[in-house]
Image (cartoon, rainbow, N blue to C red):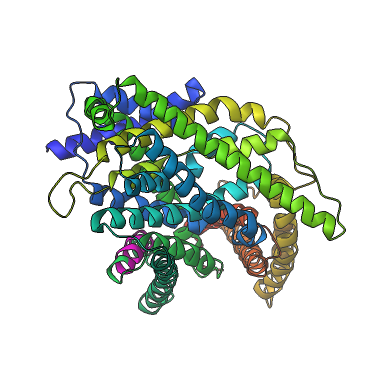
Amino acid sequence: MHLVFIVLVLLLAIVVSAPLARWCRIPAPLMQILIGAALGFSILPTVALDPSVFFLLLLPPLLFLDGWRIPKEDLLRFAAPILELSVALVVANVLCVGFLIHWLLPAMPLPVAFALAAVLSPTDPVAVSGIVRRTTAPMRMKRILEGEALFNDATGLVGMRFAVAAMMTGSFSLPQTVLSFLWVAAGGLACGAALTWAILVLARLVFGREENRGAQILISLLIPFSAYLVSEALGFSGILGAVAAGVTMGLAEQSGRAMASTRVARSEVWDAVQFTAHGIVFVLLGEQAPALLATAHGASDFAGLPSVWWLLLDVMAIAAALVLLRLAWVWASLQVKMFQARVWGFVPRPRTWRYVTAMSVAGVRGAVTLAGVMTLPLMLPDGTPFPGRDLSILLAAGVIIVSLVAATILLPRLLRDVQLGSEESVEVQVERVRALAARFAVSAIEDAQHALASGKIDADRYADAAAGVMAIYRRRIEAHGNGPVEVLEGRKSDWIERRLRLAGLRAERDAVFRMTRASEVNGEAASIVIRDIDFVESRLLRKQKPGTE
């Protein structure tokens, strides 16, 4: 009962955080930290975190969902900047910030400093999305940040894993580390993709055409944990296994084989999972405030600092180093790209200083950083406490809060009226996808009308219904009289219209899936259109059909 009570309190805190964040006009993660801190300082019992359980329950589903929903064509389109930020910049962070942390806090062993720098490298797209949603951030910038966050999670956590292994074993070999990284990365990606594909194929064989919606939703919830656990059991990266499972799930979704009602229900369930998992991470961060403050004196004594307040200076220095390194990296990358454009005979489009600064400040740390630092071992193999664990958690929590506050204050100002050329907004892309799909829908409605009216006496009724459906915003209104004959006629007309509308919706959805697989339309816009179609189809299918035609 004690555990159940704590879980219910945490869930209530997450629910309350959403309206409070809107009312106070601050990002939801920051509000959740504040609510968690209030709970931590209250008389309620605190949560004793088990690092391994905390990591397993929260990270795989979050990384899986990011890989599932990110537009795949944008991953290819912005592959170069995404890889630069998610791999090369992470390596630079581990080296530069790791040495900085060791220089600031010599008592912290260098491998632990590298582990802390590695876990500070991943960025949190959900944390920053609450901030950029109120701005006119360019679509290119959003896609790069999302793709970076998808892969730097894995790079940073795998880097932390090798740094911790070096601390536990007392040995480190750069060539062996690079080879091991490539092995666990490639194995994790292959394992996650293969396992997801096998599960989906098996599910289709078991359920056939009669789709069990509850079972399909449960399967999607189990896939990220399966990919993570199997990859780890085989000695690969479970994090990359979960990411690859999500990307594979997104590609499989483009086949359009799932029923509309299943996609609608599954999307709602995963929205709730994402909201809850992220909320729990930040509420727990705030809730651990008393425990973190209680360890502050011990951490400062371990670091040999004259006062606890020096830890705040160290937090600010580390956060500033992460931003400055990111700023230098983004600026240098843009200079290289503009030089290449001039060499190839193109006129490079210059980026404003506000765009470069915004890309740097947008590197907000969040759920992955906290979950990762919590998994630092409690003990060394000889039974002694892991050196600097409490200090690492304290510094990571401070950097998360500082990055959130800085982004909240600076990003809306930096992104005001920033544009990157003539890129289409999501709304424009959605309308373009609708217009392309509507052509197929109209053709399908005409075919369905002829098929339904073939040999019928009241063929004019089918023509009238088809004309009403093809006129997108005009619905046919059947007068339902008081007599049973009029009611039956009205019901039959409604049924005819529903059949025609369903034919149009299915043709429209098939066309969107086909264009998405061919990379002819934007993935995010296609997802929005598919979701709208699924909602309408689900509503129509719930209506009762007439007993006779």
Where 296 falls versus 513 (above or below)?
above
Q: Quadrant of residue 500?
A: bottom right
Residue 44 visible, this orientation: yes
Is 485 left or right of 126, judged from the image as shown? right
Residue 27, given in percent of the width and then of the height, sits at 49, 30
| Residue sitting nearer the eye, 490 or 503 | 503
Residue 413, given in percent of the width and then of the height, sits at 65, 26
Magenta segment includes 223: yes
> Could you tell me which residue is drawn at 45 percent across and 28 percent down?
316
Magenta segment includes 255: no
Is 138 left or right of 544, judged from the image as shown? right
Residue 549, given in percent of the width and then of the height, sits at 57, 68
Q: Quadrant of residue 308?
A: top left
Q: Magenta residues, as a range?
A: 220-231
| Residue sitting nearer the eye, 172 or 495 | 172
Where 187 falls versus 141 (above or below)?
below
